[in-house]
């Protein structure tokens, strides 16, 4: 029996009113004992909706799509990990491919962001994944290794970490990785972690798959041995769709 994690990346979607409505729908669809499997990543302007205990029973985890690597200072437009923590957030995406691509985030930043998250007791969810050009050129493993180890080598062995494999070519494209492709990449990531941290610590790190996950493909992906959860963008935007992903995946745990 495996337990799975269902993470919703809302990206730049939803007003506070829409977020509240979503949570109401979600609570009517997912029973309380199952809600601990979920983590929501709303846009920062909606954190306060999740921080409000009237709309969010304590069991529902949430976090930031991005944090800056300094807690305070002259960094216009950035999100503070300190504020996230103070508001009850528990997780943070690090190095999502859209951050790497549109905001040119270099690995030195991702290292510092992971470190500050860990220092505050926030769980970093490091995102790695190759582009279609890199996959075609046979560079998938080299890219995953570089993106993963550039961070893992700079944090203490066994420190809190989740990893998401998100092939860039599958994000928002409707072109999901096959269960075999996803599992193969996860196996490779696990083997890298195993080499660095040893088998028992490596096995404890949840490896999430992301990229066009929806209810139609969730069951076959969830059946794979190395897939411990999903990071879902588009199909997490409607509570009904996200709950359906959970329902389909539950057939495997
Ligand atoms: P998608 O996005 O599910 O819309 O492909 C996933 C992500 O970017 O985290």
Image (cartoon, rainbow, N blue to C red):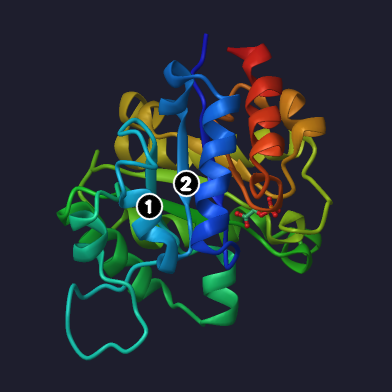
Neighbour class for label 2 at 10 Å: few (<14), some, many (≥20)?
many
At 47% from the left edge and 53% from the top edge, which residue is drawn? 41
Residue 92 appears in view: yes
Instruction: Pinpoint residue 1: horizontal percent, then vertical percent.
Output: 52, 8
Instruction: Pinpoint residue 190: horizontal percent, then vertical percent.
Output: 49, 36
Q: Quadrant of the C terminus?
A: top right
Q: Earlier in the sequence, mark 1 or mark 2?
A: 2
Residue 163 sits above or below residue 98 on the image: above
At 34% from the left edge and 42% from the top edge, which residue is drawn? 196
Instruction: Pinpoint residue 62: horizontal percent, then vertical percent.
Output: 39, 46
Q: Which mark is residue 75?
A: none
Asked if disc 2 is less than 8 Å from ligand 1, the answer is no
In this image, 87 relative to 46: left or right?
left
Residue on which the image places disc 1: 63
At 63% from the left edge and 26% from the top edge, which residue is drawn? 246
Q: Which quadrant of the picture is home to ligand 1? A: bottom right
Q: Along the line of sight, which residue is nearer the eye, 208 or 40?
A: 40
Residue 222 sits above or below residue 191 on the image: above
The secondary element bearing badge 2 is classed as strand
Instruction: Pinpoint residue 197: horizontal percent, then vertical percent.
Output: 31, 37
In this image, 47 relative to 155: left or right?
right
Residue 223 appears in view: no
Residue 80 sits above or below residue 32 on the image: below
At 44% from the left edge and 20% from the top edge, which residue is drawn? 32
Residue 240 sits above or below residue 247 on the image: below
The secondary element bearing badge 1 is classed as strand
The Cα–Cα distance between marks 1 and 2, rounded to whole angstroms, is 6 Å
Q: Along the line of sight, which residue is nearer the eye, 144 or 25?
A: 25
In this image, 145 relative to 199: left or right?
right
Residue on which the image places disc 2: 40
| Label 1–label 2 contact, CB within 8 A | yes
Q: Along the line of sight, which residue is nearer the eye, 165 or 8?
A: 8
């Amino acid at each position: 029996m495996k337990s799975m994690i269902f993470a919703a990346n809302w990206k730049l979607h939803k007003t506070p009113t829409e977020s509240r409505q979503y949570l109401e729908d979600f609570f009517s669809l997912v029973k309380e004992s199952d809600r601990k499997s979920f983590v929501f990543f709303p846009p920062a302007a909606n954190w306060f909706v999740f921080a409000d205990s009237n709309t969010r029973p304590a069991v529902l985890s949430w976090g930031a799509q991005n944090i800056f690597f300094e807690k305070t200072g002259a960094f216009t437009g950035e999100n503070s990990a300190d504020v996230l923590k103070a508001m009850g957030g528990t997780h943070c995406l690090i190095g999502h491919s859209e951050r790497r691509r549109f905001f040119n985030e270099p690995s030195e930043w991702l290292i510092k962001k992971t470190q500050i998250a860990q220092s505050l007791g926030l769980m970093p969810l490091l995102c790695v994944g190759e582009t279609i050009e890199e996959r075609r050129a046979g560079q998938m493993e080299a890219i995953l290794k570089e993106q993963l180890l550039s961070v893992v080598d700079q944090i203490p062995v066994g420190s809190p970490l989740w990893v998401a494999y998100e092939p860039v070519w599958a994000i928002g494209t409707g072109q999901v990785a096959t269960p075999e492709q996803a599992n193969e990449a996860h196996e490779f990531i696990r083997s890298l972690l195993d080499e660095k941290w040893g088998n028992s610590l490596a096995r404890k790190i949840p490896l999430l798959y992301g990229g066009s996950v929806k209810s139609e493909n969730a069951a076959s992906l969830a059946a794979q041995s190395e897939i411990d959860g999903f990071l879902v963008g588009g199909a997490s935007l409607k509570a009904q769709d996200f709950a359906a992903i959970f329902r389909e995946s539950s057939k495997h745990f």
